[in-house]
Amino acid sequence: MAREETLPPDDILLQVTPALPIADVWEGLVRPEHLVKWLAPRVNIAPYEGGAFELFWDEKDPTKNSTQGCTLLRFREQDEISFTWKGPPQFDSLMNQGTEPTEVQIRISPCPEGIDVTLEHRGWKAGEAWEEARSWHFRWWDDVLHRFKDYVMTGEAPSPPTRE
C-alpha cells in the first residue's frame, strides 16, 4: 500500500484596497515612522535589496519575539517589497531554527477603487505543526493588513499588534 504524500499548505494571500495615491500607500508600507504605528513597536529597515528588515515586539529582549536577521529580498519603489520572515515565539523551533525562513511579498498596484495592497506569505511546509503556524499567520496578517489600511486612511491606528 503506497503512503500518501502530504502536500504543503497553500500560500497565504490577502488584499486590502486603500483609496489613496500610490505614494501615500507606499510610504505607509516602508517608512519606519509609519511601521511603528501599525506593525511593530520597533523597526530596523535598510530600504534596499539585501538590507535589514527587522521588526521587534519585545523591546526588553530583541532576540525573543522579532524578525531579527531577516532581510529584504526585493525592494522596488512604489511596486513591491519582499522579505524573509521569522515566526513568533510559539513557532520558534518550527520556523526559526534549522529551516529556511518563509518569505513575505507585498505588492501594490493601482485599481479603480484606489491601490490594491496584496500580501503573499509563502514557504510553508507539510505537516500539522506547519498548518497550525500557517493558520495563525493567516489570522495575524489579516488583522495587520486591516490595521495598515485603517492607519493610512485615517492617520490613526491602535497600538501595533502583538505576536503571542
Image (cartoon, helix red, strand yellow):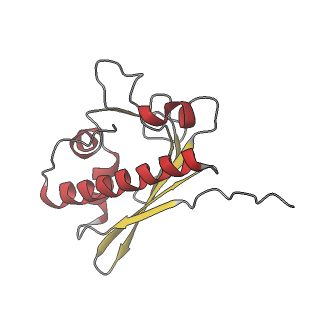
Residue drawn at x 24%, y 44% as measured from the top left: 34
Query: Is 36 rendered above or below residue 74?
Result: above
Residue drawn at x 17%, y 61% as measured from the top left: 153
Q: Quadrant of residue 58?
A: top left
Residue at the extreme bottom of the image, as rendered: 112
Q: Quadrant of residue 53?
A: top left
Residue 48: percent from left, percent from top: 48, 41
In-front residue for pair 135/141: 135
Query: Is 24 rendered above or below residue 96?
Result: below
Q: Is residue 87 left or right of residue 100?
A: left
Residue 118: percent from left, percent from top: 42, 64
Residue drawn at x 42%, y 36% as measured from the top left: 88
Q: Is residue 75 visible?
A: no
In-front residue for pair 30/140: 140
Query: Is 83 rendered above or below residue 142?
Result: above
Residue 109: percent from left, percent from top: 40, 69
Q: Quadrant of residue 31?
A: top left
Query: Is 48 rendered above or below residue 134?
Result: above
